[in-house]
Amino acid sequence: MRPTRRGYAALAVVALALANAWLSGPRALNAVAAPLLVAVAAGAVQVYRAGEPDVERSEPRHGFPGESRTVELRVDGGGVAAIEDRVGEGLSGGVRAERSLPATVSYEVTYERRGLHRIGPATVGVRDVLGLVETEYEIYERDEALVYPQVHSLAEVGVFRRTLGPESDERTEFDRLREYVPGDSLRDVAWKASAKNDDLLVTEYTDPADEEAISVAARSDDDRADEMATATATLVVGAVRAGLAFELILPDGELARGFGETHRQYALELLAQTTGGDVPEDAWNEADVRVHADADGTRVTVGERERDLADLTATRDNPLVAEVEA
């Protein structure tokens, strides 16, 4: 606990009054110094009784670089407070505000780059109502914001499947065309025949593949983890949209085979935190799709076919963000 600038000024006036009283008599002391001393003492009692405030922060939703989220800071207690909340690297935002407690302060946090980033600690400086005495509390409770890697818009689904799907000789003999029904894989849509018949038709094979799935392994130089994560996230989103199941092998972990939006979410959370590095050689060699990022760029390899990531993408727009905004 310490005096504020205003409190120091008040104490300086008291000191001058004491000096004047010593020269001119005690009346000057009673008229000036006594009320100020009472005010400072009352302020100290008020701040002491207020005690340490309770602080509760809302944890922001996950998001992508460039997105913003609202954080609410609830501060319970008494007195007047100078509230400050800080954010770590990878985020921008924070707040400085003065409020009478209890109070709720809201501010915007912008996600700058991929990763798991801290929010906090908060600092609350509690003052008396006259602003003469204050004490500062460092609230060490922290929260985290998870920022996914950037996801690029892929070329149309047919291009994605032809590039990343199994080779044509892996499919068995043609059987017939039939009408599309919900749940059919988009890989089997006969686009040319559908266009001629003004209806969506699906190709059936005599012995269709048991499961439409790909395994994706990714590795990178230590300083190229962001590029690796972006490429892999782009492929994962494309796989889900193309009706494919997928599994991931990354330098910092693996994700078992699965499909759908929930599995995509798990993948994005893992990719948000993975670092650069290598993966086991056997897993790398057995993967259907291999992503490698280094100083020469980011490449996607399927079997003997190698593609630059840019060859698979239509734009740099994030399709997931566009869906939310729509």
Image: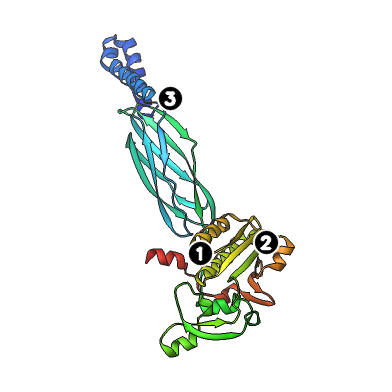
Q: Residues within 10 Å of mark 3 (few under 14, many from 20)?
A: few
Disc 3 or 2, which lies upstream in sequence? 3
In the rendered image, residue 249, in percent from the top left (x then y), is placed at 64, 61
Residue at 54% x, 51% y: name it: 116
Front-lying residue, 284 or 95: 284
Q: Nearer the viewer, mark 1 or mark 2?
A: 1
Residue 12 in view:
no
In the rendered image, residue 5, in percent from the top left (x then y), is placed at 38, 30
Mark 1–mark 2 Cα distance, whole angstroms, equals: 30 Å
User: Would you name the residue on which mark 3 appears?
Assistant: 1
Q: Residues within 10 Å of mark 2 (few under 14, many from 20)?
A: some
Residue, far bottom: 196
Front-lying residue, 79 or 28: 79
* Quadrant in which the C terminus appears: bottom left
Front-lying residue, 230 or 174: 174
Left or right of 3 on screen, residue 225: right
In the rendered image, residue 182, in percent from the top left (x then y), is placed at 44, 73
Disc 1 or 2, which lies upstream in sequence? 2
User: Would you name the residue on which mark 1 appears?
Assistant: 260
* Quadrant in which the N terminus appears: top left
Element type at mark 3: loop
Kindly check if marks 1 and 3 are in contact, taking CB atoms under 8 A apart as contact: no
Residue at 68% x, 58% y: name it: 277
In the rendered image, residue 269, in percent from the top left (x then y), is placed at 54, 56
Mark 1–mark 3 Cα distance, whole angstroms, equals: 56 Å
- Callout 2, which amino acid? Asp
Q: Quadrant of residue 25?
A: top left
Element type at mark 1: helix
Kindly check if marks 1 and 2 are in contact, taking CB atoms under 8 A apart as contact: no
Disc 1 or 3, which lies upstream in sequence? 3
User: Would you name the residue on which mark 2 appears?
Assistant: 221
